[in-house]
Amino acid sequence: MENLTFNSPVLQLEGLFVSEQNLYPTFLFFLLVYVLIMISNIGIILLISVERNLHEPMYILFCNLPFNDVFGNSIIIPRLMIDILRPASERYISYTDCVAQAFCYHMYAAASHTILMVSLTIRLNHCGTLVVNPFCDNASLFKLSCENSYINNVFGLTYTAALLGSSMLCVVITYAKITAVCLTTKNKTLNSKALKTCSTHLTVYLIMWVSGFIMIILHRFPAYSDYRKGAALLFHIVPGILNPVIYALQSSEIRHVMIKILHSKKVMQ
């Protein structure tokens, strides 16, 4: 019975299974993705911060998205890159660091239930040490438990169903209203702008919605862990790359400021 209350201070991350010949190409891929996310999102934040013409509520809201993408990817990708270069048997992480990463991950994904979900998990004794994921999240942590995690499962699934369902409903209602306005106004310029913005936004939203749904469902099917890992990485990487394009570069005001800055640098040279 002692094994049932064994709480190891050190866990092992399974990470990604990468063949030896693909080790460095995979590392370089994630490095380029991370650098692109950092440069584009931090650039948007700095641009809005220093340009007084952009100190308006709409652009301050823009700052929230890139900050969230920088935060979410910074807690996942650097650690993932380090683990790619390590042998699978040496991918260790302390239980405290794992809980902290899971907390930050859920702050990025769905902040409103983070504290409750992680609190429900760390109250459980854990007798497992292998985190079957590229990073720590709440579902991976409570899989280590040797106690009954019924409450965690019920709360997690109920909240997720409510979150995904309400999110999809809001998107459907919003796009229905946008479509109605476009049909009634018959303004070609307005309709073209709405179509361009909404199509890219909808693409990112569907990628996040589908990858999040796949990630949650496949936690119940261990045989498909590779697909779940891929969905989890898509959930982070794709919005981090595309959000600056959708929400910032499509804004004519931000584009004008960027063009002005680039033009002034050319003149100085």
Image (tube, grey):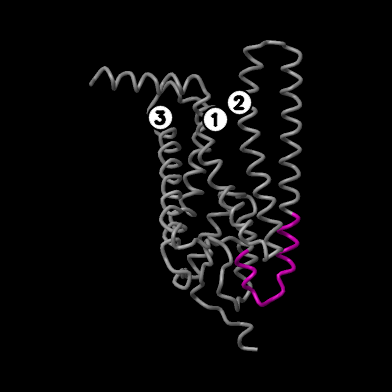
* Dot in front, 3 or 2: 2
User: As shown in the figure, which amino acid type bears the numbered disc 3?
Assistant: Leu
Going from N to C along the chain, the mark reached first, 3 or 2, is: 3
Nearest to the observer: residue 265 or residue 24: 24
* Label 3 secondary element: helix
Going from N to C along the chain, the mark reached first, 1 or 2, is: 2
Q: Mark 1 points at which residue?
A: 247
User: As shown in the figure, which amino acid type bears the numbered disc 1?
Assistant: Tyr
Q: In this view, does 146 lie to the left or right of 85?
A: right
Residue 249 in magenta? no
Q: Which percent across, then down, holds residue 138?
A: 61, 62
Count residues near mark 2 (Cα–Cα under 10 Å), then give few for <14, some for 14-19, many for 20+: some
Quadrant of the image occupied by residue 201 = top right
Q: Which percent across, then down, holds residue 10?
A: 49, 74
Judged by its main secondary structure, the magenta piece is helix
* Residue sitting at x 68%, y 52%: 214
Q: Which percent across, then down, holds residue 174?
A: 72, 29
Nearest to the observer: residue 27 or residue 182: 27
* Residue sitting at x 64%, y 68%: 142
Residue 151 in magenta? yes
Going from N to C along the chain, the mark reached first, 1 or 3, is: 3
Count residues near mark 3 (Cα–Cα under 10 Å), then give few for <14, some for 14-19, many for 20+: some
Query: In the rendered view, would you say 209 is above or below 125?
Result: above
User: What's drawn in magenta, residue-wise?
Assistant: 140-158
**Gap between marks 1 and 2, in whole Å?**
8 Å
Query: In the rendered view, would you say 260 is above or below 207?
Result: above
Q: Mark 3 points at which residue?
A: 47
User: As shown in the figure, which amino acid type bears the numbered disc 2?
Assistant: Thr
**Gap between marks 1 and 3, in whole Å?**
14 Å
